[in-house]
Image (cartoon, rainbow, N blue to C red):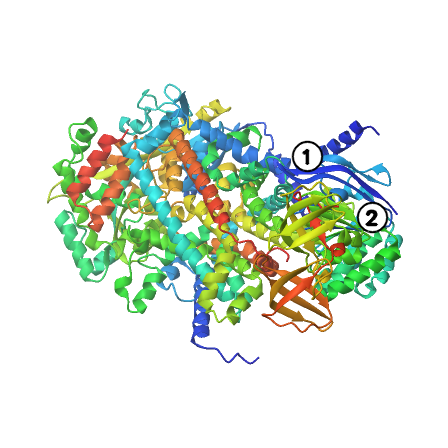
Amino acid sequence: MEKKRNAGLETWLMHIFLVGTALAVLYPIFMMVMSGFKTNAEIFGAPFALPKSFNFDNYIVIWNTTDVPRYLLNSTIVTLISVFVLLITGTMAAYAISRYRFRGSIMVSLFFLAGLMLPLRLAIIPLFVQLKAMGLVDNLLGLIFIYTAMSLPSTVFILTGFLRALPGELEDSARMDGASELRIMVQIMVPLITPAMVIAGIYNAVPIWNDFFFPLIFIQTPENKTLAQGLTSFFGEYSVNFGVLYAGLTLAALPLVVVFIVQSKRFIAGMTAGAIK
Amino acid sequence: MKHHLTRALAAALAFSIAAPVFAQTELSFWSWRQEDVAAYGEIIAAFEESHPDITVTYTAHEAKAYNTILTTALAGGSGPDIIHTRAYGSLENISGAGYLEPLDGQVDLSTIPDTLLRGTTLRSDGKVYSVPFATQTVLVYYNKDIFDANSITPPETWDEFMAAAQALKDAGITPLANGTADGWTIEVASGAIMPNFYGETFFEEVTSGATTFDDPRYVTALSRMAELAPYMPVGFEGVDYATMKALFTSGAAAMFIGGSWEIPSWRDAGLNVGFMPGPAAEAGGTRMVATWLDGGYAVNAASPNKEAALEFIRFTATPEFAQMLADKLNNVPAVQGATPTDDALAEIIELQENQTPYIMLVAFRFNKPTGSTLLQDGLQQLLTGSKSAEEVAAEVAAGIAAAE
Amino acid sequence: MQTADYARAKRARARNLKLWLAFLLAPPAFILIVFVFLPMASAVLYSLYDWDGLVRKEFVGLDNFADILFNPNKNSILFNAFWNNVKVFTSLMVIQNGLALVLALLLARNPRGYRFYQVVFFVPVILSTVIIGFQWKLFLNPVFGLVNKALHYAGLSDWALPWLGLPETALPAMLLVNSWHWFGFPTLVFLAAIHRIPKDFIEAARLDGASEWRIAREIIWPLMAPAVTIIVVLTFIGSFNWFEIPYIMNGLEGSPQGSTDMLGLLFYRTAFGSVSAGGSDFGAGSALAVLMFIFIFIFSVIATKYLTSREVELS
Amino acid sequence: MANIELRDVNKQFGDVKVIKDVNLAVEDNEFVVFVGPSGCGKSTLLRLIAGLEDLTTGEIHIDGERIDHLAPASRGLAMVFQSYALYPHFTVAQNMGYALRVAREDKASIDKKVYEAAEILQLTEYLDRKPKALSGGQRQRVAIGRAIVRNPKVFLFDEPLSNLDAKLRVAMRIELTKLHRALNATMIYVTHDQIEAMTMADKIVVLRDGIVEQIGAPLDLYNTPDNRFVAGFIGSPAMNFFKGKVSGVHEGGAEITLSDGTLINFPGKNGTLSVGDNVEFGVRPEHFSIEPGADGSLRGEVYAVERLGGETYIYLSSDSQKEIVVHATGDHRVAVGDRVEIGFTIAQSYLFGPDGQSVR
């Protein structure tokens, strides 16, 4: 392909800037993965160098000391179910707020917006008392409920914007066609905001997958630990084995990064194309 | 997709009801000591052998979050049967709230010295809530190989210490691994240096109110700390605990001021390490070591298995337990009657002849702001040169006076 | 059919609509109320009581609030943390969102590697804050850190500083790390907004001979206002709840010397206590949480209102 | 196959009354156009009939049966929207058959009906495409096809041509008229374009501010507008209005003095006028002649001329009238700056009283 003639200074600057930013992003991540193969001495002594050998010693340490498969399963269960419930309930709320005029609709949207600004961490003690009363302490269901509740506001926030942008004549038309409100929502409107749902899904799956705060408080038995929690508690107070740490961090990051890269086409298309035109 | 979800749901439900019922009493035991999981496993096995009807499950939580996890669980009416507690102010926070079972009369505490029991006694009712487990001692570690290579003998006085540091520095070696990024590490370091300058009686005087922290002796001690700065690593302001340890274990730094709990990690790293108390103020002066009680074992007042839990706690107050603590964990047990088999441990116990309380933790972590907060902030500023020793002392004194 | 029957039929339709709305709103509202609002309401209640550490004593009204706001021993810490949060917000607006805006404008010109950049810029957003915090903490280490090593190689040894250890540099360093973590998110949101602007507007301006800078400032910027609203509000909320990065990188005390102390850290310390800073106080902690919530809520609503009012309707 | 009756229909949004006491009868097979400036309530009225909005008060009947309490789909109507409202994720065939699928008709019958409608509209080759891949005109036809498939009693159109370009609009106008004849259905059509109204309607309903100003056949509205608003809205270019005063009333007639002093005598028209009333005198541009008229003349200076060969538009102004438009057939050799005299006849001019109503 022939390049355009006007590849002037400005264009060069742009490319340099973009490449520089991309390097600034990729290099530290590359270093993290590499450090997972290093010993402590290598990390401290030759930080820039490639690992002496690509052995999986650090990973073996993690595998042997912690129950990684169980943690992975737990994190997957919690993240998948939370995001699933979240998208369903979030879509329901966003649909009601964005597609109907009703008395108190402003109050309802403020109600959900308020949740967006409310860091649940601040109410951890009453939350614990409540979950205990419901028998949800040391139970993955408890985490699922917390994560769903925590992520609902932002989901409603994102989906409301997209749903508002859909033309009203579409649902009028479906109404004339005799479709019930449920059918209009499920068959006509919601399929049009799937990009937004992918956005909301990934946007919320990231903090859920990575969270270690709530599991620390609410999960006690080792069988119920999540990956982030399992690894966090593995790095004990006085152990400063950075190679193992990096291996663990890489391991924790890997599943989500893979999901993202696989889904990136849809996700980014959804993000950048916005609502249908 | 649907299939996976159903399976996932089923799994989630299965976990929630998978609490098997045993005929015997099952006790849960929480701690922040993740590095001790294996040792506690052996200790518990010994206990279970003599108490076949009791099972104890040891759970080590993430250390930084242990306070939050425990506090939340207790406040939520939950928590383990047996609690590994900290001592002093941290313990008062939960014992004062009534979450712990008073142990007086239920556990034989005669094997424990009063000074240590004070660390687990609630000041308001005078009752003991936790069986003290081990003491920690602040030591100056030195890399014997580096000292030998540079023909340096372990310094005994402050002047010798300074001279040794200068010699190391001239040889291109970082004399001291300590930094100030993690405030608590510099407070620990002060525990090795300062007591020999503010003297043996200062603790009693300052806790009884006879003097305050702007006492000239304390100011002198502080100014000694400031003199350490040139011998700390380049950029010591940003050197945290992990970096300190990395510097010392890698042989980049020759000395490390830290707690007695470090010994196993030096051994793991294969270092040829010696240790000594902080240098004396002048030749022939006493070399005191700061010590404190690291914590204890307590019973959750809300535990449904209180009797079994108390049984375990009684076990922790026995010399048998102390011996295991010394052998398996290399700790200086609070319970008397153990004979250390480890040379280093024996040496530390010997050094404790000249012990002085680790001042802020032992006496000034009950109110806010704590003495530790004030001292750590002050030391950071002192070492970077943004405050003088007089200013720091005055601020600590004012802060302690205003604390409530 | 009687007139009344028609009226009844209409009411039935209206009622069905109400039932439908209730069906839509009940489950999400239920989850939110039970797992967010009820605990928060309890926290508000807690804040009105005197606490002896973990034990609730008598009702004291607003004393806890008065204490943290007006007690000279405590409010200096509060104001310091608050001021730091203000710095965080303004800096992130400039550094993180400014960078994102520039990148979005560049990407909107569809340069070679467009897709690649979009994916790459978003990868840090996917990583956990723990990973990023630890990673950068090590990079910024004064002894082993890559940053200082790189500065040495570049002949800028004087610039090598204990970044996280100095009160002047610790917060800026963390802000850069946070920007590294998050800039991909506003970049994509801005890019989406730019793509939504009809091409004719930009082409017309280009035909009129407007410079790229002028087009960016006078056409694109005003028309991407809704995206700006979202980002400003999210940045605001995120800045005043900032916790993970300072917690992981410099611990709970906001060291050195409170230069990285944040309201979130202060809350955590107050409510749960810490090894060095002393025991927990639910009363003061809850009062602080309530104050934070009120502040963030009010300002977010005002900001949303104000920013929405300057949005231009397209078409 | 249906007639529609609106009785005392009112609609209020909050405190704002958008439809006020509308009474209207649409006969079977009639093509009725609601016309009026934007915001006049014509779309709202259509949506009330469709059931997309609820009446505040009043009744709507179709074929004598009251339907205003029914859901939109139960009313036997179909609607074509301004934006076409095609479902973007459905193919053309799925779009057209959606209503039947909702009504659970069997697949074969749906396919048949969709195919038939597609044939009428020449859409058969696009049935598997998504709306995105269609041109504006094709989308328009799909939208109509979607309505046809349902075989409704009444078709409702909400400004369906406003998104098309001028040429396509003219073509679609004719197609719609043809379709009306072919389907033999009642149609209600909303537009703000009076040309669409004039060319397509059997009956026009002129609306302003939620009030029906006049109902009638296109030429009736043209020839005998009830009031100044209708007179000005129907006809292009719009009627010229001249301010005047009643200077005399006599048996069966009135004498008007325009502001430039011209005296006009209206035999047989005085209504309820009395001396001194402010009135307006109206003449359509095409009813002026460029010569002194039998019943009177006005004068002005030419400031613009548009000569199209077959017809000429002349724009005049005078001291008392900023703009007078004259539409003459053929070519006229007038030049800018000329002072000309234009004539009118009483038979082809209008008089509006102080209340804006035509004086009859």
Residue visible at 74% across and 38% down in the picture: D9
Residue A98 pos. (x, y %):
62, 44
Protein chain holding label 1: C
Residue A89 pos. (x, y %):
63, 41
Instruction: Look at the numbered disc 1 and give the secondary structure of its residue.
Output: helix
Instruction: Look at the numbered disc 2 and give the secondary structure of its residue.
Output: strand
Q: Is residue C157 visible?
A: yes
What amino acid is found at the position of numbered circle 1 in the picture? Lys
Closer-to-camera residue (D250/A149): D250
Q: Nearer the observer, disc 1 or disc 2?
A: 2
Residue extending farthest left: B283
Q: Is residue B133 visible?
A: no
Closer-to-camera residue (B104/B86): B86
Residue identifier under label 1: C18
Residue identifier under label 2: D154
What amino acid is found at the position of numbered circle 2 in the picture? Val
